[in-house]
Image (cartoon, rainbow, N blue to C red):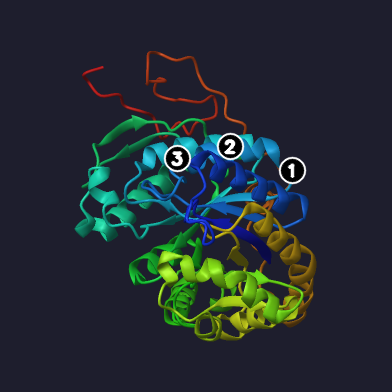
């Protein structure tokens, strides 16, 4: 099982001064947290995507590419990549490139997001959100697996003889999680492809998303990817940890009460009725163990640790407590009760092994280019000869 942290690059006014951090400071603080998570042995760091103030997380590929060079072992991910308003061709190119830079330490969480105005900003209609998500991922899936793609859909111009470059590292696409908290169609899509399903149950009541997770598991088995209990589930959460429970409440309260999403909400009620885990390390451990009781064996647990106004020094303390006091116990406890045969979380190494066995992974070598944006009928020396590219006649 994988444990890690995620953020969305949000900025909020400091509860004591009323002054928010600068965007430059927020970006630097995010980098510090990711590097600390790597050094402390956490498994995953995930970055969100937003395109409006008070967020700075508008370019996850740029951030993750930088972190690929600054980290050693941690898996880099997104939380989420907007599959509705990003062009799937650009997603395919950007994240395949980052996958190379990270030497495979990359996967992707796709979702529709929760900011309605983002759709017209990028020329889309929110009323088509679900069809966009379904169609765009279907195209992305093909772009990472076929050297030559001919495609036509509803929401973008057709593709004829198109090759997305670079090809995924070792010929194996980044693993994909579909993030959704209200949409059975997305759970169905994740199950159809045998991809992961991520329920970020950070703000809802405890186990509110269990019906969607159960539905995904049933459909995962229906499509022949394994038993329902083998389905690849990830969960979000939020925590604040201190050696003493009361200290955790006292220190976190100003940030909780000043955060726009939580205004008017009691911290005690939120800790009791939602997945917010607050208190001593043991209390956070105990709360997290209840997630398995509700959702079954799962594969990835991510926590938000640095809501908008929290100073980076406090967030770094949180990451250290999580990595040294909480996660080691959770690894032991959850491994001890894991049902027999439930597979490990997919990684680049495991996907390569599943694809090639003892054979050598693919290393695509392009044929000479026959002109800008075309590479002849076979784009690579080892391209499938039955999938020849036919260029548009206008070329």
Query: Front-most of 165 and 24?
Result: 24
Query: Front-most of 37 and 180?
Result: 37
- Dot 3 corresponds to which residue? 92
| Left or right: 311 in relation to 158 | right
Placement of 44 over or under 93, stated as above or below: below
Residue 172 disc label: none
Residue drawn at point x = 49 percent, y = 51 percent = 20
Point out residue 156 in the picture as x, y percentages from the top left corner.
Answer: 25, 41
Query: Front-most of 193 and 184?
Result: 184
The first of marks 2 and 1 along the sequence is: 2
Q: Is any atom of residue 190 visible in this view? A: yes
Tell me if label 3 and label 1 are in contact, CB under 8 Å: no
* Alpha carbon distance from label 2 to label 3: 14 Å
Residue drawn at point x = 44 percent, y = 15 percent = 369
Query: Front-most of 277 and 126?
Result: 277
Q: Quadrant of residue 215?
A: bottom left
- Dot 1 corresponds to which residue? 72
The first of marks 3 and 1 along the sequence is: 1
Residue drawn at point x = 22 percent, y = 43 percent = 123
Q: Residues within 10 Å of mark 3 (few under 14, many from 20)?
A: many
Residue drawn at point x = 32 percent, y = 51 percent = 84
Q: Quadrant of the N terminus?
A: bottom right
- Dot 2 corresponds to which residue? 65
Q: Tag 3's secondary structure?
A: helix
* Alpha carbon distance from label 3 to label 1: 24 Å
Tell me if label 2 and label 1 are in contact, CB under 8 Å: no
Q: Tag 1's secondary structure?
A: loop
* Alpha carbon distance from label 2 to label 1: 13 Å
Point out residue 394 in the picture as x, y percentages from the top left corner.
Answer: 21, 18
| Left or right: 127 in relation to 358 | left
Q: Residues within 10 Å of mark 1 (few under 14, many from 20)?
A: some
The first of marks 2 and 3 along the sequence is: 2
């Amino acid at each position: 099982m994988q444990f890690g942290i995620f953020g969305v690059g949000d900025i909020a006014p400091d509860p004591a001064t009323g002054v928010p951090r600068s965007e430059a400071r927020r970006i630097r603080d995010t980098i510090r947290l990711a590097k600390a998570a790597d050094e402390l042995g956490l498994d995953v760091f995930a970055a969100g995507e937003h395109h409006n103030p008070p967020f700075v997380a508008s370019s996850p590929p740029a951030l993750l590419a930088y972190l690929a060079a600054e980290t050693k072992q941690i898996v880099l991910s997104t939380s989420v990549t907007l599959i509705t308003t990003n062009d799937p061709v650009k997603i395919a190119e950007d994240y395949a490139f980052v996958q190379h830079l990270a030497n495979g330490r990359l996967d992707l969480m796709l979702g529709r997001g929760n900011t309605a105005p983002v759709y017209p900003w990028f020329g889309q209609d929110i009323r088509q959100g679900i069809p966009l998500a379904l169609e765009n991922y279907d195209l992305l899936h093909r772009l990472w697996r076929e050297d030559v793609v001919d495609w036509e859909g509803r929401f973008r111009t057709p593709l004829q003889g198109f090759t997305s470059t670079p090809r995924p590292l070792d010929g194996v696409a980044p693993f994909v999680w579909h993030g959704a908290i209200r949409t059975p169609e997305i759970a169905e899509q994740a199950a159809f492809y045998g991809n992961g399903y991520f329920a970020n149950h950070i703000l809802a009541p405890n186990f509110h998303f269990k019906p969607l997770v159960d539905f995904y598991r049933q459909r995962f088995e229906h499509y022949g990817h394994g038993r329902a209990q083998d389905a690849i589930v990830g969960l979000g959460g939020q925590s604040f940890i201190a050696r003493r429970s009361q200290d955790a409440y006292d220190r976190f309260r100003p940030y909780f009460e000043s955060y726009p999403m939580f205004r008017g909400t009691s911290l005690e009620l939120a800790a009791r009725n939602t997945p917010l885990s607050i208190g001593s390390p043991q209390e956070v451990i105990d709360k997290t163990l209840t997630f398995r009781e509700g959702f079954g064996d799962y594969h990835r647990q991510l926590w938000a640790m640095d809501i908008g106004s929290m100073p980076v020094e406090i967030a770094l303390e949180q990451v250290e407590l999580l990595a040294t006091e909480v996660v080691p116990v959770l690894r032991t406890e959850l491994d001890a009760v894991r049902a027999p045969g439930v597979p490990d979380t997919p990684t680049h190494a495991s996907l390569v092994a599943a694809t090639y066995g003892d054979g050598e992974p693919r290393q695509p070598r392009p044929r000479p280019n026959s002109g800008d944006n075309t590479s002849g009928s076979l784009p690579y020396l080892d391209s499938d000869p039955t999938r020849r590219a036919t260029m548009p006649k206008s070329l």
